[in-house]
Amino acid sequence: MPDYGHPLRFGSFVSPAHATPRRPVDLAVLSEDLGLDLVTFQDHPYQSSFHDTWTLLTWVAARTSRIHVAGNVLNLPLRPPAVLARALASLDLLSDGRAELGIGTGGYFDAIATMTGAPALTPGDAVTALDEALDVIRGIWDVADPTPLHTGGEHHRVAGAARGPAPAHDIPIWVGARQRRMQQLIGRKADGWLPSLPWLKPGDLAAGNRVIDEAARAAGRDPRAITRLLNVTPQYSAAALAERAIEDGVAVFILASDDPAELRRFAEVTAPEIRDRVGEARSRGGSVAAPRAARSFRGDPVPAALAERAILPSDRGYARYTSGFFRGARPGIVLRPQTTAEVQEAVRFAARHRDVPLGLFSGGHGLSGRSLNDGGLVLALDALNEISVSDHRVRVGPGAHWAEVAQALAPHGLAITAGDAGGVGVGGLATTAGIGWFAREHGLTIDLLRAVDVVTATGDLVHASATEHPDLFWAMRGAGANFGVAVSFEFDAHPVPGQVGFAILVFAPDDVAAFLEGWGAAIEAAHPSVTGTLMTGPGRRGVPGPVHAIVVVDSDDPDVVLERLQPLADLAPLADHAVRMTSYAGLLTDQPGAESQHGQGEPHSHSGLVRHLTPEIAAGLADLLASGSPFLLSVRSAGGAVGATPADATAYAWRDANFLLVTLGGGSPDFERRWAELVPLFEGMYLSFETDTGPDVVARAFPPEHLKRLRALKREWDPDMLFRDNFPIDPDAD
Ligand SMILES: Cc1cc2nc3c(=O)[nH]c(=O)nc-3n(C[C@H](O)[C@H](O)[C@H](O)COP(=O)(O)OP(=O)(O)OC[C@H]3O[C@@H](n4cnc5c(N)ncnc54)[C@H](O)[C@@H]3O)c2cc1C
């Protein structure tokens, strides 16, 4: 007996005919008076004899006080999901949690096409459309996520939609469907199956349940999470319907009738008899209700401590983990530990599933996009975001963002140099290097790191510092993602004035190569308090594009700021410029576009570290730009204090490099070839701006001696390569 353990409920299914406009409303009121739980209406807006179902639902909700209302089922092609989600949430709020969602793809594709003018959907399209719509609806309701909603898709996509309102209750999504692929979708990500008994042949319910249950299990869900509903007609006896509950797990029976006498009989005679029969069968069989937290991944139950907050593709918070900064993803499960102990459990769980990708997700800004994945496990560390300051020592969780760190440190007159964008997470940046504003004055972010707590591949918690596990501490500063999950960092912050200089200089150089060379020399000669980034694109029709320079000067004296900017401003004619004083936290937050994480494509980003912008390198970069193949080239400052730490002191080795080059392109063969030709001119490469992840990339990111040591350490700490998704270091390679 597939009893899914849901309480029995009974409803009515009323025609929305408007021949007597108030009649459907009266039948709804009668349904409530009779004690039914639910009143539903079919949704065929192309039939002129019917009310618009949505308008009717709202009227009924206002005229009743207890009964729940739903479309049976709402017609997705005619009700755009983002609009529908808001409408439902509003109705749910207005009716104190009585709005339910039954949805389907219409079925009458030709009629829908006539009404919309759009070509008729094929059944295959309909499944995809519904799949996408569920993401949109749940995404709109997910107000816990502060970012605008972005979902990709063929039929329903939203780009930056505001979320909300959230409904008053967790509205389950019931799908009306008969096709196998639709049933598989229900198993994967819906909350209920709502077929109509008169349309079914004997055995169809059992067969549909099997498909749904199998799909649910494959998606890591407990099949009991999916409610089985059934539209019935007065011709079926209570005994026959009770059998459907007992044998097929139906828990909600909805009577299609506009006859008050039939509705009364159903509520007063049929429903109680079904209850009695099912009650007896249950007391014999002893069924148990499914706890929401019973979750599994590929048949393996998720540990209890993690199950409640685990996110499967069917869950409301899933959309948050389907886009990184550049790339889209569809993880199989997202584990969201709240504590270090839970991270340890999550790592042990992941170790049982080595054959699928394992993403470590802190701030989600990783350019390679490997913190998310398709079908694998994601360990999301958003909740580990504590920031505590004691004197100049700062303890930070990997899930914190650098803007939050800057804001927390500002009242103490402190900062930690850490990149240029506040939305970047601590976990990803502080395990690779951190080349940021003030790098020339204070070094890399990892140079300020004094200790890191790591959950290693065995699930053990290890405190790594200069005196405890110094080898691991060495590896975590440059190749951290290969060695474990960093769960807490301890930094020594540096002092920062309340205001620093910030300039945008827009150059219009005739000769880009000469300008780059000049920029290189000027930055190298500049006071260590000066850091600058150039950004430029390919230009048009042979004319170089403008070159934007963003320059930060760590001084609160405007005269000093101007004096230190002047040699840079003199390099070429300025098309525009702006100079102002701002806080360090302001530097990290005033970056339009730097916060967004709705990547769906596959842009290619490459990076190179160079000691000087030599004539050869400058000319190569100018040629690359002139070819039109990259979207963007940026030249960031390293150098200065970065070189004060010996090259062998950390896994990040390129201490002599004064500049980080980053280019972004669509991956055209021309772009790739031109970049590859430049690579031999570079000293090294910085993982954080690279989207390729193969062994040749790793070999460019570390000098041979470093790589040798990293491989030996990998053999010690992660010989079976649990942590291998982003720039894997092969312990056994020569
Ligand atoms: C707009 C923008 C601006 C940037 N500016 C700079 C800059 O100025 N300077 C600079 O140095 N970098 C910069 N970066 C690159 C950035 O440092 C990396 O992308 C970094 O990996 C992002 O960290 P995250 O936690 O946000 O990313 P996530 O996507 O969460 O993680 C990226 C990768 O880091 C690793 N990782 C994440 N968390 C952990 C953890 N807790 N333990 C171990 N490994 C972990 C994993 O390999 C993961 O795949 C910038 C990126 C963007 C998108």
Image: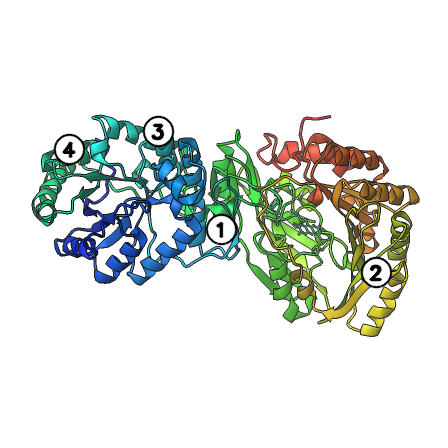
Task: Give the color scheme: rainbow, by chain, secondary structure or one colour.
Answer: rainbow
Could one spot residue 63 in this view of the protein? yes
Q: Which residue is mark 4?
A: 243
- Element under disc 4: helix
Q: Is 47 situated left or right of 581 in this image? A: left
**CA gap, disc 2 and disc 1:** 40 Å
Which residue is at the front of the view, 306 or 74? 74
**Amino acid, disc 4:** Glu
Circles 3 and 1: CB atoms closer than 8 Å: no
CB under 8 Å between callouts 2 and 1? no
On screen, residue 235 versus residue 521, left or right, reads left
**Which amino acid type is marked by label 3?**
Arg
Q: Is residue 330 left or right of residue 367?
A: left
Is the residue at mark 4 in contact range of ligand 1, meaning its CB lies under 8 Å from it? no
**x and y percentages locating residue 505 in the rendered image:** 80, 61
Q: Of callouts 3 and 2, which one flags the residue occurring earlier in the amino acid sequence?
A: 3
Nearer the viewer's eye, disc 3 or disc 2? 3
User: Dot 3, how many residues are within 10 Å of its Cα: few (below 14), some (14-19), or many (20+)?
Assistant: few
Which amino acid type corresponds to the residue marked 1 in the rendered image? Thr
Q: Residues within 10 Å of mark 4 (few under 14, many from 20)?
A: some
First in sequence: mark 2 or mark 1? Answer: 1
- The residue identified by callout 1 is 339
Q: Nearer the viewer, mark 4 or mark 2?
A: 4
Residue holding disc 3: 180
Number of other residues with Cα within 10 Å of mark 2, as a class: few under 14, some 14 to 19, many 20 or more: some
